Image (tube, rainbow, N blue to C red):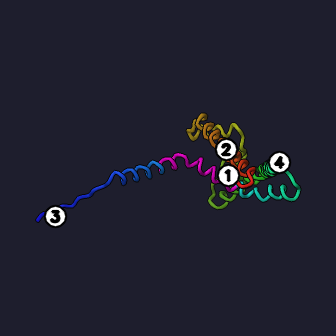
Amino acid sequence: MENKNSFDISWATLWKISTVVALVFIFYSAREVFSAFLISIVLSLGFDPFVSFFEEKWKVNRLLGTIIVFLAVIFIFAGLVFFILPIISAEASGFVEHFGKTISNVFGVNLPKSIIDNFSLSFENALGVLSAARISIPGAISVVFNRMIIIFGTIVAAFYLIVDKDG
């Protein structure tokens, strides 16, 4: 007696598999947009208590309260960057100098003086690093522009989620 094994797949199963594959492809292709949307949801949940405080305590319109909160966050962030970035740059320069001395003391190898003296983040140095790494300038600009659009979209989505009281 001959035993035959058959494997049958229905059309419904094939359609389900192709639908799942298509959804995975769509989610993978739009992963930056979905992550930006999730970040905007988190931002709106974080800023909502402040906007609600302005709305309830000071009877400020929700739109105006949202604008006040966003401007306050932007000013705080800009102030931190303005005051902290020079300190970080100075500390990094000191670290490189101290690191060079430590390497010299431990291993007996001196870092070139030009590396220590020229440790600064300038536009020319950044372009030199990009060209040395064989990264095209238009490609780098494209990546930066793409990231700026994603960040702007995240902020706008968070703004609209906060303006709507039941957002």
In contact (CB < 8 Å): disc 2 and disc 1 = yes
Q: Is the magenta stretch mostly helix, strand or loop?
A: helix
Mark 1 and mark 4 residues within 8 Å of each other at the beta carbon: no
Q: In this view, does 148 lie to the left or right of 6?
A: right
Per the rendering, the mark at residue 64 is 4
Camera-nearest label, 1 or 3: 3
Q: Which amino acid does label 3 sit on?
A: Asn
First-in-chain label (4 vs 3) = 3
Residue that protrudes farthest toward the left in the picture = 1
In the image, taking residue 56 as reference, residue 88 lies left or right, namely left
Instruction: Please name the residue shown 55% across and 46% down the image.
Output: 30
Residue 163: % across, % down: 75, 50
Mark 1 falls on what kind of element? helix
In the rendered structure, which segment of residues is drawn in magenta?
24-42
Q: Distance between the residues labelled 1 and 3?
A: 60 Å
Q: Residues within 10 Å of mark 3 (few under 14, many from 20)?
A: few
Q: Label 1 crowding class (10 Å Cα cut-off): few <14, some 14-19, many 20+?
A: many
> Closer to the camera, 77 or 21?
21
* The residue positioned farthest toward the bottom in the image shown: 1
* The one of 37 and 139 positioned closer to us in this rendering: 37
Is residue 165 rendered magenta in the image? no
Residue with the mark numbered 3: 3
Q: Give the alpha-carbon distance from disc 4 to disc 3, as whole Å.
A: 77 Å
Q: How packed is label 4: few (under 14 Cα within 10 Å), some, or many (20 or more)?
A: some
Q: Name the residue under label 2.
A: 153
The dot on residue 40 is 1
State the image coordinates of residue 111 (x, y, percent, origin top left): 65, 51
Residue 129 appearing in the image: no
- Mark 2 or mark 1: name the one nearer the start of the chain: 1
| Residue at 69% in and 43% down | 152
Rendering coords of residue 77 (x, y %) = 78, 51
